[in-house]
Image (cartoon, helix red, strand yellow):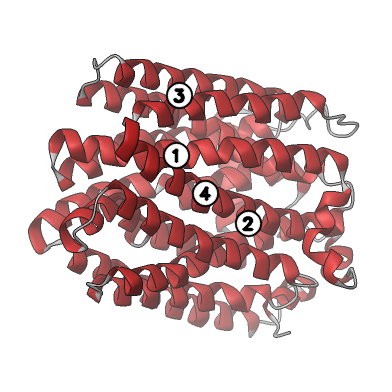
């Protein structure tokens, strides 16, 4: 079912020595993207931390934390599949430039409202929905665009891992800065800095020279294209299993982040700086997960690592829910961050390795739905559940369900690999190495 064109080369090509950690940076376009996006993401994480603290400061409600998270992320679930169809038909760089410019406008509007003291919860919700729609189109297209920025396709897995390291390096830096700024001058400055940071990634995109894939394949569009992509993904067992596990973890595990203000203030008896440290610790662990994946010579055996990373993530959440000491919570969030990024990035790499090129955008839209589109439902669920059974128990339940999902994944993939019809090159991804 899934394409294997070029897979053998991707599976076997290696770069010797420490250079393999950053081998995707050999491509000029990816270097530009890496630098510009890295700066922009620091601002993005500053805004996320400042936003959660602002909502909790204005309302003091865990339920509203979940509601705001739901409102800002539900558009991804609704619109991402159509963005995938678009990504397979249009110039991806142009779409990303437009989405980044609109995201900059959202951040600057938010900054103006907060700095003038006119901010209200309903405005946060509306602007959150606006950003959610932007991200719904940005993320699948951006994920699909990676293959165009990397000149050597054997470096694709390394580029995805480096991207995860970049995201989580920003998660380390951004929240730490946000915690200090929120305590010193308030949330508005964080939103302003984020708005200005988009100039870096827009400049990088404009400076690129894309010589291939400027014209997208003219495949089915609209509902027909969406149906074709859905059948392609969910009729092939490995792709289906990866997407379903990612969706489960995003639903029950990832929403722990919306409850971080509660852990910072009520459980660990801290303030904005404590929240920044907690988010920063998650970022360190996540960055280590990205570095580990970048150090791998190939994607051989990567499929087996997906459930292992899921288990690490789940165990980290369970232990974190029991911690009442800041130093221990920080250490455990290192584990959580490592497992979270390792699972998501491994899933991305496996999917991008086996997908047919003319369906890449649509598969990445399903990846976005599973990774980000399920989070709003999880945020709403976590906020409501925390108000009933408490925040620590809510996080513990998420960890336990994630572990169970990883075990079920192993069972399903093992059954698939025992079938004689399993494609050999695809199965190699699940072999130990």
Q: Which residue is mark 3?
A: 192
Residue that protrudes farthest toward the left in the picture: 388
Residue 322, image x, y percentages:
23, 75
Q: Which residue is mark 4?
A: 173
Label 3's element?
A: helix
In the drawing, what numbered circle is on residue 195? none
Q: Front-most of 302 and 281?
A: 281
**Left or right: residue 109 compared with residue 202:** left
How crowded is the residue under tag 4: few (<14 C-alpha within 10 Å), some, or many (20+)?
many
- Mark 2 or mark 1: which comes first in sequence? 1
- Mark 3 or mark 4: which comes first in sequence? 4
- Mark 3 or mark 1: which comes first in sequence? 1
Whether pointer 2 and pointer 1 mark residues with C-beta atoms closer than 8 Å, the reply is no
Q: Is residue 402 above or below residue 156?
A: below
What is the CA distance from the residue labelled 3 to the residue labelled 1? 10 Å
Q: Which residue is mark 2?
A: 165
Determine which quarter of the picture holds residue 266: bottom left
How crowded is the residue under tag 1: few (<14 C-alpha within 10 Å), some, or many (20+)?
many
Image quarter of the C terminus = bottom right
What is the CA distance from the residue labelled 2 to the residue labelled 1? 17 Å
Q: Which residue is mark 1?
A: 46
Q: Residue at x 18, y 59 (%)?
A: 269
Label 4's element?
A: helix
Whether pointer 4 and pointer 1 mark residues with C-beta atoms closer than 8 Å, the reply is no
> Which of pointers 2 and 3 indicates the residue nearer the eye?
3
Q: Front-most of 174 and 348?
A: 174
């Amino acid at each position: 079912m899934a394409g294997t064109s070029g897979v053998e080369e991707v599976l076997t090509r290696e770069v010797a020595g420490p250079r393999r950690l950053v081998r995707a940076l050999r491509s000029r376009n990816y270097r530009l993207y890496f630098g510009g996006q890295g700066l922009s993401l620091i601002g993005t994480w500053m805004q996320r931390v400042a936003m959660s603290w602002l909502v909790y400061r204005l309302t003091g409600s865990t339920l509203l934390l979940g509601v705001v998270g739901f409102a800002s992320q539900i558009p991804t679930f609704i619109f991402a599949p159509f963005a995938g169809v678009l990504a397979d038909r249009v110039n991806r760089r142009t779409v990303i430039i437009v989405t980044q410019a609109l995201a900059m406008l959202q951040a600057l509007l938010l900054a103006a409202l907060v700095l003038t003291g006119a901010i209200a919860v309903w405005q946060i919700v509306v602007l959150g929905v606006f950003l959610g729609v932007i991200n719904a189109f940005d993320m699948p297209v951006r994920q699909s665009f990676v293959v165009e920025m990397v000149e050597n396709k054997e470096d694709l897995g390394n580029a995805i891992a480096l991207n995860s390291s970049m995201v989580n390096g920003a998660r380390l830096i951004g929240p730490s800065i946000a915690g200090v700024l929120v305590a010193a001058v308030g949330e508005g400055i964080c939103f302003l800095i984020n708005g200005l940071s988009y100039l870096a990634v827009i400049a990088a995109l404009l400076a690129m020279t894309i010589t291939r894939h400027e014209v997208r394949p003219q495949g089915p569009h609209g509902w027909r294209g969406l149906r074709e992509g859905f059948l392609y993904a969910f009729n092939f067992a490995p792709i289906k299993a990866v997407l379903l596990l990612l969706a489960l973890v995003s639903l029950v595990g990832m929403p722990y982040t919306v409850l971080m203000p509660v852990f910072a203030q009520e459980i660990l008896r801290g303030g904005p700086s404590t929240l920044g440290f907690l988010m920063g610790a998650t970022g360190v662990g996540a960055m280590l997960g990205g570095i580990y994946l970048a150090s791998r010579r190939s994607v051989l055996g990567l499929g087996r690592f997906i459930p292992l990373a899921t288990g690490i993530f789940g165990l980290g959440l369970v232990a974190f829910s029991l911690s009442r000491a800041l130093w221990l919570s920080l250490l455990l969030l290192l584990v959580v961050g490592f497992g979270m990024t390792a699972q998501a990035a491994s899933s991305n790499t496996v999917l991008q390795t086996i997908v047919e090129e003319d369906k890449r955008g649509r598969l990445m839209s399903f990846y976005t739905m599973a990774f980000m589109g399920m989070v709003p439902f999880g945020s709403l669920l976590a906020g409501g559940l925390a108000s009933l059974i408490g925040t620590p128990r809510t996080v513990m339940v998420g960890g336990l369900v994630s572990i169970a999902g990883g075990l079920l994944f192993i069972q399903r993939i093992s059954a698939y690999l025992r079938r004689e019809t399993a494609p050999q090159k695809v199965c190699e991804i699940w072999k130990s190495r």
